[in-house]
Image (spheres, rainbow, N blue to C red):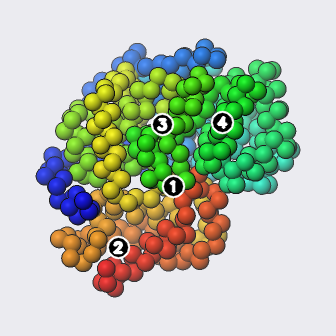
């Protein structure tokens, strides 16, 4: 069945969902989530999981601190603007009051300012009220030396204003050249041995890693579990990536495998990308209608959070919540958790298969590809394309029933989302962005493909 026929068959469901119903919990959008459940959120209903290595009682909803709000009401991940510390404090206060106690940050987040903002907000609470997680984010070759990596590690303590770190991660193992980069970042400079010593001394309470990219690195680190005794591992898990990660991106690894390997060894899993970069909160209208019909009182995004939280080895599920509406909706998913049934799992697998019919690009807006040396706004280009795919504004040809409206929506939205000088037409294919992408997207290929599509729309030759 081709895409056009798929849309025709599902078209009958579109009328039951409004535009607000697909908003979900996506960073960068202000305003209320129209399909979020309403009503009071209890302060004593959070679901907790126990870390078997440390005994920590961790909230199933974890606060991802990559998207703190700015003074201009956007996300600090997206804008060159100061973080709104007053609003960060308000979000942290509300989260802690409702049971959230796991806060995940990094020296790389919010253009280097997340740790400081997080530390200021958390310092106002008793130390036993929260667990703070941060990372040794020594991606750049300039930070591979022992001295530079050590300086980054020490600075995290200063910025966070703590004398111990609850959860310390080797950040993004498997990225770049895989094992070669891993050895340069953590082995040849002696940093992994140093971090093991820090854990033994109590300055790190739990040591783990976050995985992106080459599965050989993931497998190697787990094969060394008897030596390193990983306290936790952070993986990407959602109901599309569970069985279809390679269909989304041929270089990715199915979450079913990653989780299974951790489960066999009794290693707790911390979950990132439960919304697949926001795409599971901004699904196509027809798919949103199906989700809402099955569970009218819940948001579209809640299905993805409940999926991730229903696995018993999951310690916490991270969400980057820029606005209070995001936080409140996600609290409703985990305070308390209503675990998926077997029928729910079958339904979500069917939903995942439907989503794969829409050729979105697996960009999660991490911005590791930025800055582009030629000034392109790579994430904005890819996200605009994905948005148009989900909204049905990527026509297959000029004979499509709604071709004119889709053509206008794509081109007008493109110019509004991405300044002309930062659009895909300016990509020269230097490939500098490719090695930095955790999703291992062939970014120049995608940019050239989008640019070709735009030119066809402009010239009317599609």
Which quadrant does the C terminus fall into? Answer: bottom left
Q: Earlier in the sequence, mark 1 or mark 3?
A: 1
Disc with the residue nearer the chain's start (2 vs 3): 3
| Dot 2 or dot 1, earlier in sequence | 1
Real-space Cα distance between discs 1 and 3?
15 Å
Tell me, yes or no, whether the two marked residues, 2 and 3, touch with CB atoms within 8 Å.
no
Mark closest to the chain's N terminus, 4 or 1: 4
Left or right: where 157 falls relative to 357: right
Query: Looking at the image, do the residues carrying marks 4 and 3 touch, with CB atoms under 8 Å apart?
Result: no
Which label lies toward us, 4 or 3? 3
Say above or below: 83 vs 126: below
Q: Is residue 109 visible?
A: no
Look at the numbered disc 3 and give the secondary structure of its residue: helix
First along the sequence among labels 4 and 2: 4
What percent of the width, then of the height, locates residue 400? 21, 72
Per the rendering, the mark at residue 411 is 2
Query: Which label was assigned to residue 250?
Result: 1
Under circle 4, the secondary element is: strand
Viewer-nearest of discs 2 and 1: 1
Observer-nearest residue: 184 or 262? 262
Q: Mark 1 Cα within 10 Å, few/some/many (few <14, many 20+)?
A: few
Q: Is residue 97 placed above or below 136 in the rendered structure?
A: above
Whether tag 4 and tag 2 are in contact, CB under 8 A, the answer is no
Gap between marks 4 and 2 measured at Cα: 41 Å
The residue pinned by badge 4 equals 209
Q: Quadrant of residue 453?
A: bottom left
Q: Which mark is residue 67?
A: none
304 to 363, vertically: above or below: above
Q: Is residue 415 left or right of residue 63?
A: left
Residue linked to disc 3: 256
In the drawing, does residue 173 fall left or right of residue 255?
A: right
């Amino acid at each position: 069945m081709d895409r056009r026929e798929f849309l025709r068959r599902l078209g009958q469901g579109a009328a039951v969902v409004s535009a607000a119903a697909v908003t979900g919990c996506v960073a960068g959008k202000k305003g209320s989530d129209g399909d979020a459940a309403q009503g009071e959120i209890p302060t004593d209903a959070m679901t907790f999981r126990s870390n078997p290595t440390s005994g920590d009682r961790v909230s199933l909803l974890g606060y991802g601190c990559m998207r703190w709000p700015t003074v201009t009401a956007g996300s600090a991940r997206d804008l060159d603007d100061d973080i709104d510390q007053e609003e960060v404090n308000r979000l942290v206060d509300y989260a802690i009051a409702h049971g959230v106690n796991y806060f995940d940050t990094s020296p790389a987040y919010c253009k280097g300012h997340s740790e400081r903002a997080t530390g200021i907000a958390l310092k106002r609470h008793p130390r036993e009220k929260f667990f703070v997680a941060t990372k040794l984010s020594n991606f750049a070759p300039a930070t591979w030396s022992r001295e530079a990596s050590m300086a980054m590690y020490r600075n995290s303590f200063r910025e966070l204003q703590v004398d111990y770190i609850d959860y310390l991660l080797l950040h993004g193992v498997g990225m770049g050249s895989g094992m070669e980069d891993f050895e340069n970042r953590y082995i040849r400079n002696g940093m992994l041995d140093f971090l093991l010593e820090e854990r033994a001394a109590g300055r790190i309470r739990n040591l783990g890693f976050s995985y992106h990219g080459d599965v050989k690195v993931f497998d190697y680190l787990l094969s060394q579990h008897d030596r390193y005794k990983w306290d936790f591992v952070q993986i990407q898990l959602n109901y599309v990536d569970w069985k279809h990660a390679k269909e989304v991106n041929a270089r990715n690894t199915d979450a079913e495998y990653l989780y299974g390997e951790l489960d066999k060894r009794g290693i707790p899993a911390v979950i990132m990308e439960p919304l697949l970069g926001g795409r599971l909160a901004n699904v196509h209208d027809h798919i949103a209608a199906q989700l809402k019909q099955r569970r009218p009182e819940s948001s579209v995004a809640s299905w993805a959070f409940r999926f991730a939280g229903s696995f018993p080895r999951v310690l916490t599920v991270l969400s980057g919540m820029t606005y209070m509406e995001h936080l409140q909706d996600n609290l409703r998913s985990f305070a308390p958790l209503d675990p998926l049934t077997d029928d729910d799992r079958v339904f979500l697998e069917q939903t995942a298969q439907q989503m794969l019919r829409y050729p979105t690009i697996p960009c999660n807006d991490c911005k590791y590809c930025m800055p582009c040396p030629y000034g392109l706004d790579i994430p904005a280009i890819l996200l605009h394309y994905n948005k148009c795919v989900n909204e049905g504004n990527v026509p297959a040809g000029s004979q499509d029933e709604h071709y004119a409206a889709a053509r206008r929506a794509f081109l007008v939205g493109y110019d509004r989302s991405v300044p002309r000088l930062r659009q895909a037409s300016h990509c020269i294919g230097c490939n500098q962005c490719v090695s930095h992408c955790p999703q291992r997207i062939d970014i120049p290929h995608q940019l050239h493909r989008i640019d070709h599509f735009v030119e066809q729309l402009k010239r009317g030759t599609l």
